[in-house]
Image (cartoon, coloured by chain):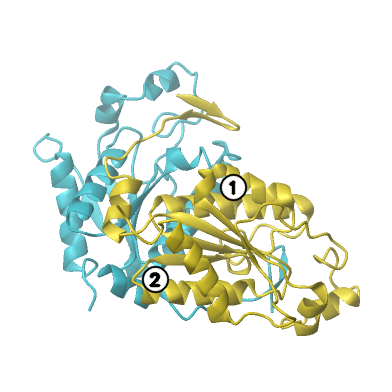
Chain colours: A yellow, B cyan
Amino acid sequence: MATLGNSTNIFWHECPVGKLERQRLLKQKGCVVWITGLSGSGKSTLACSLNRELYTRGKLSYVLDGDNLRHGLNKDLGFKAEDRTENIRRVGEVAKLFADAGLICIASLISPYRKDRDACRAMLADENFIEVFMNMPLELCEARDSKGLYKLARAGKIKGFTGIDDPYEPPLNCEIEIQQKDGVCPTPGDMAGEVVSYLEGKGYLHYQ
Amino acid sequence: MATLGNSTNIFWHECPVGKLERQRLLKQKGCVVWITGLSGSGKSTLACSLNRELYTRGKLSYVLDGDNLRHGLNKDLGFKAEDRTENIRRVGEVAKLFADAGLICIASLISPYRKDRDACRAMLADENFIEVFMNMPLELCEARDSKGLYKLARAGKIKGFTGIDDPYEPPLNCEIEIQQKDGVCPTPGDMAGEVVSYLEGKGYLHYQ
């Protein structure tokens, strides 16, 4: 019996079918690919492209998109600092469940603060958290402005917008960094390929 | 762009690999098996047994256990009425994600209030929410008292304990009801078999 935060009388139920069995069934290893970066840096594009590339290889992945989750699990949260932290905590906890279920879970959200991302990393065995930093210049993201949000932020109609009037803290030790080469952005396929190569090299796409 | 509760500037990203593709990969259909009932009624036992039975058939399922989630996603919640409601809402939202990922998601939690369970049902297409009512007499659950919680509740050391000083509202239209036959409890295998037969009959264990 345990006392945890506001909860008491909580037992832990161990089920005889665990992560190993599910990984054997899926012929892959569960993990979290955490894509972080500015709005407009290509997080969702990479998430979709990676999801498709893994599917064509017969691997089961699932995208947790920060925006989409705000329609459901996190619809009670706004964009205040503590709400952002709670938003990321919940996505981390859910991503952990998906990894435990044996899936390659692709989490795609700005997640601007280092401590929030590191808290998610700490939830998992370190090697099962693969941080992908979309290292694109603010000017590029703002020029794209596919959602028109930078314009609103510059006009002061959105407050606390990451990159404009709220900081983005780049990762210090991410597993993968996506960036321009000679001023040219990698294609979605190139970006996905980079992550797939990493997963392949680390043995996530097989089960031995 | 949408305004939802506390969130604005939220877009919906559609990925080209969707539920249908994942179901094809897994050769099954995603759904939620929601097991409700008193403490000690056998929810976790059924969840484990069902999980194992599905695994032996090569099907991917995952158990969301109410107690276990209180160690992670829901560790900020207690047992007040609004916390219980939020606890169940979050489990429902996560179960929905797992079903969307193509898994047979087995949610196991007391979930004593009808309106909370119905809210989870409403999150999914109706036929993808399979409510299993562990209809065991309170006397039996209390006699088992495998966690020693009824004893504590009777002694007044736990307040608001379902069945003792907090109500359990039985489902009115559940898909499956597990009960004693001639005063004898079904075995874990029998209970799992009942759910598997239902899933089989409804086509969840295949993909056409």
Q: Is residue A177 above or below residue A126?
A: below
Query: On the rendered image, what quadrant is the N terminus of chain A found in?
Result: top left
Q: Is residue A153 left or right of residue A178?
A: right
* Mark 1, residue position: A121
Q: Residue at x 47, y 72 (%)?
A: A51
- The amino acid marked with disc number 2 is Ala
Q: Chain of mark 1?
A: A
* Mark nearer the viewer, 1 or 2: 1
Q: Residue at x 52, y 75 (%)?
A: A48
Q: Residue furthest right?
A: A155
Q: Is residue A62 above or below residue B195?
A: below
| Front residue of this view, candidates A70 and A107 | A107
- Assign a secondary structure to mark 2: loop
Q: Is residue B49 above or below residue A145?
A: above
Res B172 seen here? no
- The amino acid marked with disc number 1 is Arg
Q: Is residue A8 left or right of residue B32?
A: right
Res B66 seen here? yes
Which quadrant holds residue A65? bottom right
